[in-house]
Amino acid sequence: MKLNKLMLTMAAAALALTAVSCSDMLDIPQKGVLDYNTYYNTDEQITSADIAMYLEVRGWEYNVKLCKAMFTDDFWAGGSMRGDNTDLEHLNEFTFDAEQDYIQSMFTTYYTLIYKANVILGHVDEELGAVAKQARAEAKVFRAFAYFDLKTMWGNPPLVDHELAPSEYNVPNGTDEELWGLMEQDLTEAIASGALAEKTSVDDNATWRVTKQFAQALLGKVYLWQGKNAEAAAQFDAVVASGKYKLFEDYSGLFRSANKHNCESLFESNRVHDDNNSFQNFSMYALMTNWRMDKINWPADTPIMNTGWGFRVPTKSLYDDFVKEEGKNGYRLNESLKTLDQLQSELGMSLKSPIISEGYFMWKLRILAEERGMGNDYVYAANTLWMRYAEVLLCGAEAHLAAGNADKAAEYVNMIRTRARIAPKASVTLEDIKVEKRLELFGEGTRFQDLLRWGEGAKMSENGKQYPQLQANGQVTWVSCNNPAYGFKSGKHEHLPYPATEIRLNSEIKQNPGY
Amino acid sequence: MSNSALKRLAALGLSLLMGLSLAAQPRVTVSGTVVDDQNVPVIGAGVFQKGTTNGVVTDLDGNYSISVPTGATLVFSSVGFTTQEVVVAEAGTVNIRLATDTEMLEETVVIGYGVQKKSDLTGSISQVKSEDIENRTITSPESALQGKTAGVQVVTSSARPGASPSIQVRGVSSNGSSYPLYVVDGRRTNSISGIDPNDIESMEVLKDGASAAIYGAEAGNGVIMITTRRGQGDGKISYSYQLTSQSLNRIPKVMNAEQYMQYFMENGRYTLQDFYGNWDFKTNTDWLGYSYESSLMQHHNLSFSAGNDKGNLYLSATYLDNNGMFVGDADVYQRLTFMVNGAWKFKPWLDIQTNNQVEYYTARSVSEGSDYGSAILSALQLDPLTPPTYAEADLPEFMRDYLAAGRKLLQDENGDYYAASYFNPSENVNPRVMRDRSYSDSHGFNINGSTAVNLTPVRGLTFTSRVGYRLSAGDSYGYSLRYYINQNAYQNYIGLSGSDNNSMYYQWENFANWMHQFGKHSVTVMAGTSFSSSRSFSMSGSYRGSDDDLGVTQDDPLFYYFGSHSANAVPSVSGATPNIARKLSYFGRANWSYLGKYNLQVSFRADAADLSVLPRPMRWGYFPSVSGGWTISEEPFFRPLKGVVGFAKLRASWGQNGSLAGLGGYRYANVIASTGNYPTGNGLEYILGYAPSSTGNEELKWETSEQLNFGIDLRFLRDRLTFSADWFNKQTKDLIVTGITPSTVVGVAASPVNAGNVVNSGLEFELKWRDQIGDFSYGVSGNLSTLRNEVTYIHETLSDGIDGTGVRNYGTITRFEKGYPAWHFYGYKFTGIDPKTGDAMFEDLDGSGDVTQADKTDLGSGIPKLTYGLTLNAAWKGLDAIVFLTGAAGSKIYNCLTVVDYPSNRLSYFTEDRWTPDHTDGTMPAASASNWQQFLTSSGVVFDGSYLKIKQIQLGYTLPRSFTRKFKVDNLRIYGSLDDWFTFSNYPGFDPEVTGSGSSLGVDKGVYPTSKKVVFGVNISF
């Protein structure tokens, strides 16, 4: 019996032992992350939070830039044939619904940027010093940058100006006053803070941060869209008056990676060649927008990247506007678009088999082989320009004209025309500015919002009713879709739909009419 | 051996076995009554002349009468009794009293940290025994449960070689992982796929909350206990071999070449000109025929078994080689397993038992299950106008251009080029290109088992200390080739990849069982603790070339290894962060039984999760249960019924279980993680971006299932007929939902939240009849379960539901939504075709005048309302036969096999009766309909998922022992079987049984279907 008792004791001890000794072992620390509650204290931490916003914006190249182009009368949703990318076709032809993937991603990325800005504004104490002040000022600019697109394309998106607690997830649509008010306030405060970067001179191409002038230009746009023309003009004038920007001489060269952060650039996202970290520069943009290279015969030494899906194809109407303004041999036209003939004569290329096109090829934002990441079609190293001086001048011209200052308007427009090597105009009309803006900025993501503001969405009302097939011999045959469902519909397409998932998840939001 | 030769062989064998028969002759008459030990007449007992088929059965009063020759031996038998033999001397009366066969009544069931007599059970536990598993073509233990027990649904999301189905016990109760906990010889695990079904003695499914509660936090989705084989007898060597020929069962119908041409001209995509230029008007490729072939599966099992009252030993080795139906050797699963089970009673107070298993596997597979393209889907979507291959001289011009441009075109074994489709340049390309453009295989081993030391210091008290472990390691290696087929499918270099992982898991459990009897009471108490810990570590890397650089030093498979990468190949490495998870638990259970009539059981378990799973304050979960049983057949008032109803018991139970829905990786934590690096100039100077990766949720807690169960067990007619029925209601609360964004405007991914409640309720019936008439024995067992599943609550931050899976970019098609079954189908209600345009029409539910996203609605669910199984078996002399069928009803299937982004071939179902200008009353959209995408997210592509499958028709013959003894063979059985041969279903896809799982339950995106099988097998033992 002694043995039994001994064993009983041992057993009980073993039981107790497992229980006691193990409970500490449950506290396993997490690797590779930092604690939210104690972050945002050092300059390095604050900068990293700031950089997260730059990274978010850089990701916009693929969907935001591409979508905005698709919504216009400047481009076809191309490809080798219809159905190559039905999503882009839906955007281009206004047959998208609330489930549309690209629109959902756009909406999501804007709010992701807003969240990252809100984190900084909620967590970074400006008393911490200059870095903290700058991060806060930049957060306000980025937040306004996102809201500008949300407001102008969706109308009344929910206003989120702080990190939401779970009880606040169902946010109703924001009002015009709230939304414009927040943008005005954010930009005004950021500009006044003195914390934003500024270029040292017009030749400074090392400043990559958000600048005070970018904030001013953005504020100018915020005013312009509201019809506050005098206030808008003042902001654009301030950018001009800073003397830190001018138009870049070599028109299409201003988009090249060799000329990043050039004198015309107000804000751009930076990319570099780094083969060891190529996916840090991941972007489908180049592949999506480059010419449909498998349908093209190209010489071995072609400067154009030799793969591409050709989904962003210029329209004849754009080309015609160019010809009307500057003739077939215009300098800016030649730096902007190429015809099939020019592809043959200048680049030694020819068309192999049909593609969707009217015979015009994007040249301004061409995709160069040398800017493609090494051995990888999904990496592209050219910067993405989000705002350049030309836009400031054209917006300034419009604001001045509306505010009654026609001379200033002509002056600004003529700066653009001079660089485009066409004759200046003695005076300009709003129509002149509209045309100039289309030619100067097509493909850069301003036209859709402009057309909505000008109430000219009907320009896209024929989109998709038929589409062109460019034959190898240069002839265009038209295929009719013959369905009234296609094209911009007034009363509906003035706004994009809130994503279906948002409607399902947010009980307070009201969908835009027609979706 | 070819498939047809096999079929012939099987047919020959079966017809030979059927041809045997025997006869008998009469003499004197003997009659009498057969009663049991309480003098109750035994109805239907068999009375037979030994060694003949001459026999009768007793009538309702237990009487019989039979003519036999004098000196013959009469055999009296009935299920539940021990058989008696009497030698007949003369005509007259022979009354017999049969003794109860105690062995059967005392059958025990494994219940977790102990066993219990079947008659004492108070919960709902189903059992599958080795005889239900033997000689099947299943390769994973999960499959053994299908159709054999009520309340268990086997969800097959792929039937590729080596794939394991997942199991749902009593419905979908979580929207994360809904899989049960597996306990193999006491070792908790989430995977049992490596166990060879031959090595299983029994599987128990703890279905109700009270039974499962002893496993507390992990038991929310039910518990499946597996007991592997123990050695028995004085030395038995068994070998079994099974040869299976597999081939594609149901072949979905797609358009042929001519129909394709007609369709896409109507569609406007192509003109006749296009076809003149690019089709020879002869080619009509059967891509399915080109993709699948009949293939072989072989299964060997050798085992050694011995045991006595001191101990036992069981050794087994199994080799499984399954080369799947996809053409070539691209889908292969090979597995070698060893099992070593032993036990020894060292002292009267000490015995030790150990179960150990070693598994080595190697696997290759083809792509499947993606609506964006897979080898499975491409065979359905490629146009039949393109031939599989071209000889070099016959290459079409566009492929010549590829070659001229320096593109690499893949070739088959004859040197012919795999054809690129001119008509359908989608990502779904020639299935053999999808097979050949990359190579990857994986290998790995698992060593696992458990060892228990049982101490019995005093009578009635057993203390057990048990260690379970699992050591595993695996690696995968692969390369992707330089190839070109179209703009959507190409690569300009060789890519290499490799990964390596290992993990170690152990658990240590200490528990004591104490049994005590006083008077008419009997009490059992169990208490214990458990600690488990796992660590896994993996690393993977790759090298990638570029346009200008092949990536390897030589273009030869012998150089497709990391060691031969080119100087400029880009490396990438990931992983190498150890993952550690631990769990600590306390548990206890008490049983009280009075006169064997009343049983009451309570249990409790407390579980603590580590920090990677739940925040510290929410770490502990507590899971109580109570259950009771009343054996009314033991009551005096029941006596008169006893002749018919020998046993009757009512059961009731209530219990709580938990689930962590596969949580881990600190997903509740609000932490700052890197978002990439941003270059600040032209050079490679970067600043890292850091941002919160999720909202964080410090309130996250265990998901709790609360289940009520009522059941009845009945045994009739001397236990030949058994019946049990259960009703359950299982409410899962605080459901853990992961991977959701609450509302887009929140701007960041949500951490997991306790977001909803789900109710599952249903009825389960199991009925078994078995009987023996002389040499003929037969049995029928059936089961049927109903299930009602509904999401009853969704957290207010999520409005009323969560989106599940979608199809391409066409939209969401499943939802987890209040008032509907979990992950119900969601889309437009297709109402027919507009006779004017050929467009599909949908119901405008909100009456807005337009069909918008607001008109999407419930379109049914992939969860069957009814599942059933039926097994019939019969044996006569050496012959035996089994027919096993199973089915489901009330489920729907969302068919995603058709896409409209490219001129992809479509299922004939959608094209045969389409609208055309001449056929305006067609029931399917016109080829040119403008709203095909909406149609593909509508009820137009939702089908009835009901099916009935005859899983097994097996005939076997055991050679007479008198004959086999001459060769020292104890038992020799040969058999032939048709498995998964007949399927009754209206579904136009591959296989109604194989669709997605989880949030894709019932969604068919083109997955590897179940094959039909011809089986030949032999079992031999010495």
Image (tube, coloured by chain):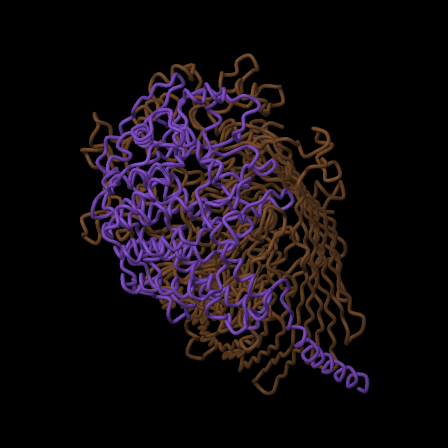
> In the image, is B830 to the left or to the right of B115?
left
> In the image, is B836 to the left or to the right of A223?
left
> B500 above or below A80?
below
**B60 or B301, which is in the foreground?**
B301
**B111 or B743, which is in the foreground?**
B743
Q: Position of residue B121 (x, y in %)?
A: 53, 71
- Residue reaching furthest to the top: B393
Residue A319 visible in the picture: yes
Q: Position of residue B825 (x, y in %)?
A: 36, 51
Residue A411 in which image quadrant: top left
Q: What's the colour of chain A in the image?
A: purple
Q: Position of residue B705 (x, y in %)?
A: 46, 70
Q: Position of residue B310 (x, y in %)?
A: 77, 66
On the rendered image, what quadrant is the N terminus of chain B found in?
top right
Residue at figure coordinates x 58%, y 49% from the top left: B681
Q: What's the colour of chain B in the image?
A: brown
**B78 or B166, which is in the foreground?**
B166
Residue B905 visible in the picture: no
